[in-house]
Image (cartoon, helix red, strand yellow):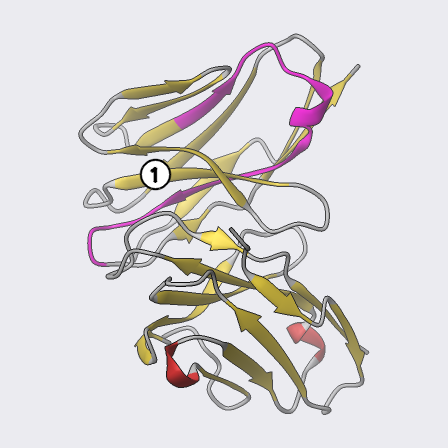
Amino acid sequence: GENVEQHPSTLSVQEGDSAVIKCTYSDSASNYFPWYKQELGKGPQLIIDIRSNVGEKKDQRIAVTLNKTAKHFSLHITETQPEDSAVYFCAARPPTGKLIFGQGTTLQVKP
Amino acid sequence: EAGVAQSPRYKIIEKRQSVAFWCNPISGHATLYWYQQILGQGPKLLIQFQNNGVVDDSQLPKDRFSAERLKGVDSTLKIQPAKLEDSAVYLCASSLATGGTGELFFGEGSRLTVL
């Protein structure tokens, strides 16, 4: 089955800097890659997703890139703000399988 | 639009006791999921319903966990008897799409502590 590895487990940046979180997946058939943000005491919330027919997707300060050959995908947050502080999860899903989450990255943005 | 509702938010029980969690998905969402999130880990799927039928329960410890979704709307997840390792947040999610596709909308979760 699918396995997703996420790095780093913690990330601390200064406000205004960029943050990058990377994930690798094992099942080459996976075709859907969402990113979720989880604030303390809340459930995960989808912030951006990408499908395997696209290499990059951007939404304001957030972008996701996908390298199908290497089975890597990454989340890029530019101009970070304190409210970006949260736990971020990547996930991957094969066409007929379930969504598999990475272990999470705790992002701290220092003012 | 109301989100996914879960209760209780917090529950503390002794090992070997039982507990039940309730979930009300977003209106009209056919697919409902229960995830277990252990501290410091990503959510792990326990069971997926489409309407009131089970799609995937391969990772549900069926000797102690059970779940039902009567009438294809609300769902309950029960643990009996609880073990220490069941301490986790139990997240319910729903999706408009069927077949495991589409965005998942999560509730705020039910935090279980087993002493």
Which quarter of the rendering shows the C terminus of chain A? top right
Q: Mark 1 lies on which chain?
A: A
Residue A6 sits above or below residue A15 on the image: below
Question: Which residue sits furthest front?
Answer: B1
x and y percentages locating residue A17 in the rendered image:
63, 9
In x, y percent, where is residue A41?
Answer: 72, 51
Amino acid at pointer 1: Phe
Whether residue B96 sits left or right of residue A37 in the image: it is: left
Label 1: element kind: strand
The residue segment tinted magenta is A74-96
Residue located at (65% from left, 74% from top): B86
Q: Quadrant of residue B48?
A: bottom left
User: How far from the left and from the top, in percent, is residue B66?
Assistant: 50, 86
Figure check: B49 above or below A91:
below
Could you tell whether B63 is left or right of A42 in the image? left
- Which x, y percent locates residue A106? 65, 35
Residue drawn at x 72%, y 45% is A40
Q: In which quarter of the image is the N terminus of chain A?
A: bottom left
Residue A57 painted magenta: no
Residue B16 located left or right of residue B27: right
The residue under label 1 is A33
Relative vertical location of residue A46 with respect to residue B52 in this rendering, above or below? above
Is A38 above or below relative to B56?
Answer: above
Task: Choose between B2 and B32: the one closer to the eye.
Answer: B2
Task: Give the mark count.
Answer: 1
Please state which of residues B31 and A29 is positioned toward the viewer in this rendering. Answer: B31
Q: Residues within 10 Å of mark 1 (few under 14, many from 20)?
A: many
